[in-house]
Structure formats: structure tokens, C-alpha cells
Image (cartoon, grey):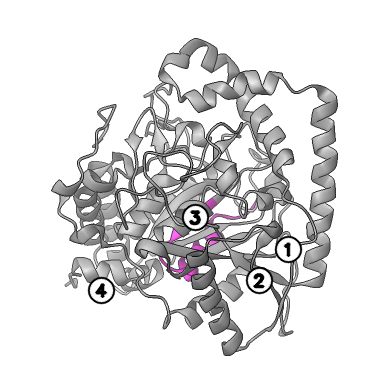
Amino acid sequence: MGYAELTADEYRAASALDLGRRVAAGELSPVHLAELALELAAQAEPVINAYAALLPERARATAAAREAEVRAGTVRSPLHGVPIAVKDNMLEEGVPAGKGSLTSSDEPAPASSPMVGRLLDAGAVVIGRTTTPEFGWKATGISPRTGITRNPWDPQRNPGGSSAGSGATVGSGAVPIATGTDAGGSVRIPAAFCGVVGLKPTLGAIPVWPSTVNENLSHAGVLTRDVRDARAVLALTRGPDPRDPQSYWSRPPAGDGERRLRVGIVRAPFGIDPEEDVAAAVGRALDALVAAGGADYAETTLPTELPRAVFEVLWVTGRGLGFRDLAREHADVMDPGLVRLGPLAEAYDLPAFYAAMTARREFNFAMAHVLDEWDLLVMPTMPITAFAADAEVPPGGEADAPLPWITWTPYTYPFNITGQPAITLPTGLGRGGMPVGAQIVGPWAHDERVLEFAVHAQRVLASTNERTVAPTAQMPTSTMQVDHPRARRDR
């Protein structure tokens, strides 16, 4: 069987589904694709530090097995033989999970997380494990275990987090798909900052295991080059798993049929204006969507205040108490910001916690009412573009806040409080040539509605977006050498 060989540029330009289709047709070799992905990831690593570990031997062996299956007439799924990366807080059987922490064991995981296991069963080829801040507790790419992860569009900038390495490696073009988790924006923030697609499905749609200390906020999701790839990943990985009881709540509803959608345009979510360059980029995208038709659009606002106090209670108590004992024993090697949450959590009393639960129900009711009036909402994903890679907040930000990262992510974490599906897709470039994203939010369990509209939006915006792949590959690796606090490159 003769295989075509892709150039690096051809590979970066292809969607995962395009690659999978050509693998299934016998045109592309999974081994060749794995080698391309490993080479591109290795080239970018000295610049962006996206990987906690590359897995070349394991990837090559898996790719060879998937190639043999195609030769024997077996194709497991539309993603058979396609290279992917896995966030280092998800488990893959036989591989250690560092979770961004020096306190993590280096013992191989005894079983795979549901999302990872299902992607492996679908024939995907994992090339490595992507970086995350310690236990995914914040929205930047800084951790005690792996140091600073950087944005592929500008290594001096932040890739966003906590799925930092996933955003950076998909943005660099090394893989078309990387898994992520999102409990406050951790898929959508890096996707917006790195110029890629980021899907947070309905809470529980993709089972989460091992469970997290904030399980009623935590979604498994995915970062991709193309909305259709995200749709394929959800189709392959959604569905109940007894290890995550929430996964039984999110069964998809009946289809919407052919009716015309009502789409609400929200330019300043929760009354917070984005920066001018973000507003301009998203505004151009919205103008193009309205001009293209296909739905009924109208301006709207969100009739509720930003639920910052609610999220702070949930996050501080969950993370602070959940890691309190670990922090007491290992504070000297842990992220100081995470350690600080323990005493903050102890300051809350039970009445304060229950008051937050009441406020959460009220907020969820208000947002559900909005989505009775509108089928979908479209808004900016972030009010800013990426800031300095070694900073926790943008210039002038609230560095001393209990949760500094939520002070600059007001458009993402509210939809973890509600559990609604949301996706971000690139909508052009803002100040300094940095990516800007637009977020599409739908009602609970209407993931397919969100994805269908996102496919339409991607098609409309394809002719207006300036650039979709970061310039990392064109940068000499000598421009930025990353200090790694722990030796952990290849396994």
C-alpha cells in the first residue's frame, strides 16, 4: 500500500476528520502522522513548553497498530489513526499523570479516564501529555512541575489555562485535537487566547473521572482546529459512565427540527465591556453572521449580575479544603496561590456556604429564563487578549483577590455555575496580532444545537478570519529557551 506524505503545512491545515478520512481510505499512514505530530511538537517545545511529557515510543507503537488495522480492513472511527494530546490531569492507563504538581506520584495510572479511554478505543494516537497549572486550579499556564507554558502566537504571552498546553499545542499546529477540562473556563480561555476551537459540553455529557473537588463545576472538553472535529470528539466520548453520576443527567434532547433559531447578541456580558480591540474583532464577526442570515439575530443583555461571589465560595471551599491536607504537608513545593486557599476556605461558615447555594439557584434560574427567550447566545469569550506569560493577572489586575484569575475571566465561569454547553471559536486578531474568540452558549443538554450553529459560524467566518495557525513553527527555537523545573520530556 503506497501512502501519501504530507508537508508540515499541509498537516497543520488539515482537520482531524480530513486526516481520519484519508487514513480510512488508505491514503495516509498513521505512523507518518504520528511522526509529523511528534516532530512539530518537539520543534515547538523549546519555545512554548506545551508538554509535561512527550510519548514517542508509545505513540509510534500505537500508530503502527492502527495502521495494521486499516490494512486488515478495520477502521474504528472517523478519528482512527489521528494524533491527539491529553491534558496531564486526565488518566491514561500505563502512563503517570503529573497534574502540574510536584506532589503527584510517578506511578503509571491503573486505568484511563472515560474520555481518554473512549478516544483510544476510537483509534486515536496519543503523542503526549499537555501542561496544566497545579491540579488545574487557575487560568494561566504556570505550574511548579512544568514551569511556564507560553502562547504559540507570542511566547512572551500567556496561553491561558488551565488547559494551557492543550491550547498551545493545538494552536501551534502539532496536533488537531487535545483534551481539556473546564471548571471555570479552562478549555475556552486557552482556546480563545491561542486561536483555536474550545468546546465545554453540558455538565456530565462527557464523564469526568477521577472526580474533582469541584465536580458540580467540572466539565471534560476538547480543543481542536475545527468545530467539526470537536463535534466528532463529543459524539465518540459522551454518554454515561457509572464512575461519574452526573453523566446520567445530560442525555441529549429531541432535535430542534428545521425551525429558525433565535440568536441573542450579547456585546457586554454581565454589563462588562471587553477591550476595544476585542469588541472590534467580535463585532466584525457578528456583522458577518447577521449578514449571512440563517437565524434571527437581535441585541440583548443578560438580566443578572456577574456571580463572582458564588463562584468564589464554590471554588475556594472546594479547592481550599480539598487540597488542605496536601498543602499542610507540601506547601514548600506547591503553588502559593493554591496553598493560600486553605485558610480562605476555613473562613467560610455554613450559613455563608448555603447563602451561596441559594444565590446559585437564583442565577441558574435567571439564565434558564434567558435561554427560554433565546435559542442561543453569542458573545466575546474573553474581555482581553493574552497578557504576559509569567503573570497571574493582566496589568492593573486584582493580584490580591482570593481568586485572581476570575477577575479577568468574567465571561466564562458563569456558565460553569449553570452547567450549560458553550463553545469558543476564533474570530480574528486583536491588539498585537493576538487571537480573539467568540463564545456561543446554549441551553442545558442542547450541545448539538450549539455545535450546529458553530459549524455555520465557522463557515461564515472562514473568509474573514486573518490567520488560524500560530507562527510558532516559523520562530527559531533559540528565541525562547524554557527553564523546566523537573526533567520530564520523553517517556
Residue drawn at point x = 35 percent, y = 65 percent = 433
Image vertical order of residue 490 relative to residue 477, above or below:
above
Residue 175 in sight in this render = no
**Can you give x and y, in whole percent of width and height, for residue 96 in the image?**
38, 31
Mark 3 vs 4, N-terminal side: 4
Per the image, the residue denoted by label 1 is: 443
Q: Reading the chain from its start, which is encountered first: label 4 or label 2?
A: 4
Q: CA distance from mark 2 to mark 3?
A: 17 Å
Give the number of the mark in front: 1 or 4.
1
The three-letter amino acid code for the residue at tag 2 is Arg
Which element is circle 3 on?
strand
Q: Quarter of the image for the C terminus: give it.
A: top left
- Disc 3/disc 4 C-alpha distance (Å): 27 Å
* Sequence-first disc among 2 and 3: 3
Write down the residue under mark 2.
449
Image position of 75 (left or right of 476): right
Q: Quadrant of residue 333?
A: top left
Q: CA distance from mark 1 to mark 4?
A: 40 Å
State the mark number for residue 27: 4
Mark 1: which secondary structure?
loop
Comparing labels 4 and 2, the label whose residue is closer to the camera: 2
Q: Which residue is mark 3?
A: 222
What span is in magenta? Answer: 221-239
Residue 260 is at least partly visible in this image: yes
Labels 1 and 2: the sequence-earlier one? 1
| Residue 366 rendering spot, x and y as whole percentages | 82, 57
Judge by depth and name the residue closer to the eye, 221 or 192.
192
